[in-house]
Amino acid sequence: MAFPPYLAVLLAGVLCGVSFVAATFRVSPPRLGVWLHVAGAIVGVGGVGWAIHGDLPDLSPLPEPLRHAVLWLRLGIAPMFGWIWLALLGRISSYFQRDAQARAATMTRTQWRRDGAAWTLCFPAVPMRTRTLVALIASVTVIAGGLAVAGLITFYDATLRIGAYGAILIFALVVGMPGYLALTALLRRGTETVTLRIDAAHLTLEQACQPPRVFALRELTLFRWQTASDHARLELTAPGVEAVSLLAGVARVPRGTSAELPALPPQLVQWLTAAGLRERPVRVAARPRTFARD
């Protein structure tokens, strides 16, 4: 088969899958639509298995247009059910995302505590530079991509049969998911409990197995604070001392507790600016608050 007809068959399979998924979303009640979607995905397992390993009956008695139609149907089954499976995964992930958002609203969050003339915060964090985290994520991505490419080359014939969407789904489950879980477990093993205390003149940092470190606010050259996402963190730099980088967003936290950091108290912001640190403006609210010395 030439490439244009082959591409058209794959596209037709995807469009059939899109139409089926859209129909399940229009079914009332919605729960029935979900069950129909699940049933279609289960049927897809058998359909794709037949497309890969099944033997066609003798088609020679059929007219040539019908023989071509059967072959096109066999090629189009994989992208159709691949799309149905991807949509089902998206449906499941959106359900868990809504559930996670509902649970996040009820989670306990670490809060600043007024300690005399100072503010104190105790939170779990992983001592690691942000660039190290980015390098680890990039390394896992490159390794997973290399394994995926090697798998596509090794199982080239099977990839042609199941289509692009089916191959992406399989490699995401077999390669991507284990890599993500392994990286998450590796990061969380380094979790430490950190106590941060800030007054009008000093910042005190206490970590496990280390003596307390005291920084004068007027000696800080950088103070960075991000509250949300996996990049929630505290970063400090000062002359003559090793830079501090504590990642709270990837740390292991007790069940029912959020890994996010609380917002900076207004008085603490006043102390930082009074010590000569100027806040850099940000255009995106999700970006960290950064105070740096000119």
Image: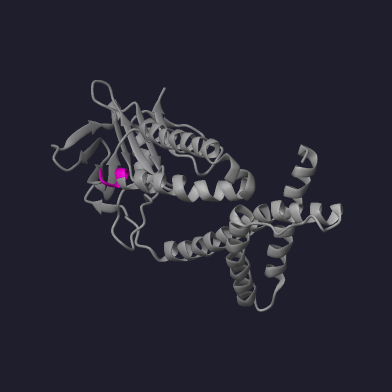
Vertical position of residue 172 compared to residue 41: above or below: above
- Given residues 195 and 37, the one toward you in this image is 37
Tell me where residue 30 sits by quadrant.
bottom right
Given residues 187 and 261, the one toward you in this image is 187
The reply to whether the magenta stretch includes residue 57 is no
Compared across the picture, whether 142 is left or right of 2 comes to left
Against 140, is 110 above or below?
A: below
Residue 139: quarter of image:
top left
Residue visible at 51% across and 37% down?
154
Location of the N terminus by quadrant is: top right
Give 124 or 290, whichever is nearer the viewer: 124
* 46 displayed left or right of 280: right
Colour setting: one colour
Residue depicted at 20% across the width and 34% down the height:
214
Depth order, front residue of 100/114: 100
Dominant SS type (magenta): helix
Q: Where's residue 79, x and y in %? A: 67, 52
Q: Where is residue 209 in the image (x, y as percent from the top left)?
A: 13, 40
Location of residue 114 with respect to 92 vertically, above or below? above
Residue found at the very far bottom of the displayed protein: 29
Q: In this view, does 140 lie above or below 230?
A: above
The residue shown at (36%, 56%) is 258
Q: Give the range drawn in magenta.
A: 186-190
The quadrant holding residue 243 is top left
Residue 59: give x, y in percent of width and height. Answer: 77, 56
At horizontal 46% and vertical 33% (from top left) the residue drawn is: 142
Left or right of 249 on screen, residue 241? left
Residue 187's spot in the image, x, y percent? 31, 43
User: In the rendered picture of this protein, how many numbered marks are placed on residues?
Assistant: 0
Q: Quadrant of the C terminus?
A: top left
